[in-house]
Image (cartoon, grey):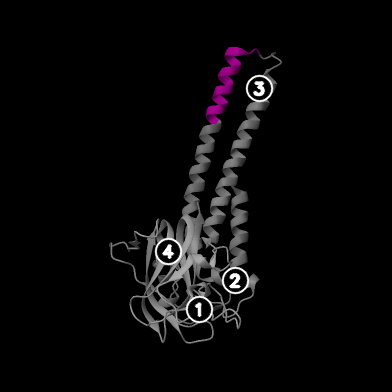
Amino acid sequence: MAHIGVVVALVIATCICSTVCDTQPQNQASKATEDTPQLYDRAPNVHCSCNCAMPAQTDRQTCDSVDRIQADLDALLAWKGTATNLLHHLKNSLQMVNKSLDDFLEKRCSPESSHVEDVATHVTTIVLEEIDRRIREATEHVISRVKGPGPLGVESGQIPDTHITASSEVNSAHGPRRARLYGVYDRRDGTGAWCAKSNDGNQWLQVDLGKPTEIQGVVTQGRFGYHQWVETYKLHFSTDGNNWRPYTDASGRQKVFQGNVDSNTPQRHLLADPVTARYARFLILTWKNHICMRMEVLGNYN
């Protein structure tokens, strides 16, 4: 397990060393997760941020990881218990194998048997391979929890334009294909966001992930270069594109997500209860000046 500790320490150290912190109070809109508010109660006057207005490709992971360091540490504490249970399980397994080997040697072989050494070597090899496999699996799980869920392909272009749809658009230059996170104005292709044709409560932005996927969170931005963004929204999910279910909080009420407070700062929310769905829809509630949005969906493909 020392290997796990070293890997985790290196991952956390990398994140922390790439972070720039200030001591400005953190407002409600800059919370990184909805499911760990207690983490922010411990240090209410510390807020970490990156200037992500036009981040370089290599800087995006650093910028997106800043606000989840505290949540990642909490996840590591949870995995400490898992690792402890794993060690107990391995200890019990080794004791059982040792007992079985003793019984085998006592009943089937004499100390002078030429097969004794071969049998012992074979069993030892099997046990060591199993231990190594379990440790690697535990390490991968820990690293996955520290990194958090990954983007599902909106920003990268893995999800095609035809899989991003909306209730309306100002014109083709403001269409939903322009809703990719970190998208910027392109003179030939369009604006730096999807923008709805009308400013009302009937507008939505939707992404088809192509197959049922574990959705663990979302990230949103406003319109690049303009004071236009979505302030609050709800999330609905579907497996077939026809039947939708809202995302609810612990009390069973539809969750209202805090959106953006400026044009370019990414606002990230992790879901307390991940959802398996093919379609994710942002239902717009309130906005600044005009309904415009860029977004990404976070999770893991099954």
- Contact, CB < 8 Å: mark 1 with mark 4? no
Q: Amino acid at mark 3?
A: Val
N-term mark: 1 or 4: 1
Q: Which residue is mark 4?
A: 280
Instruction: Report, in whole angstroms, how far the alpha carbon at label 1 lies from the one at label 4.
Output: 22 Å
Q: Amino acid at mark 2?
A: Arg
Q: Which residue is mark 3?
A: 119
Which of the two discs, 1 and 4, sits closer to the camera?
A: 1
Q: Which residue is mark 2?
A: 60
Instruction: Report, in whole angstroms, how far the alpha carbon at label 2 lies from the one at label 4.
Output: 23 Å
Instruction: Report, in whole angstroms, how far the alpha carbon at label 2 lies from the one at label 3.
Output: 53 Å
Residue 172 % position (x, y): 50, 78
Q: Secondary structure at mark 1?
A: helix
N-term mark: 4 or 3: 3
- Contact, CB < 8 Å: mark 2 with mark 3? no
Is 76 positioned to the left or the right of 118 in the image?
Answer: left
N-term mark: 3 or 1: 3
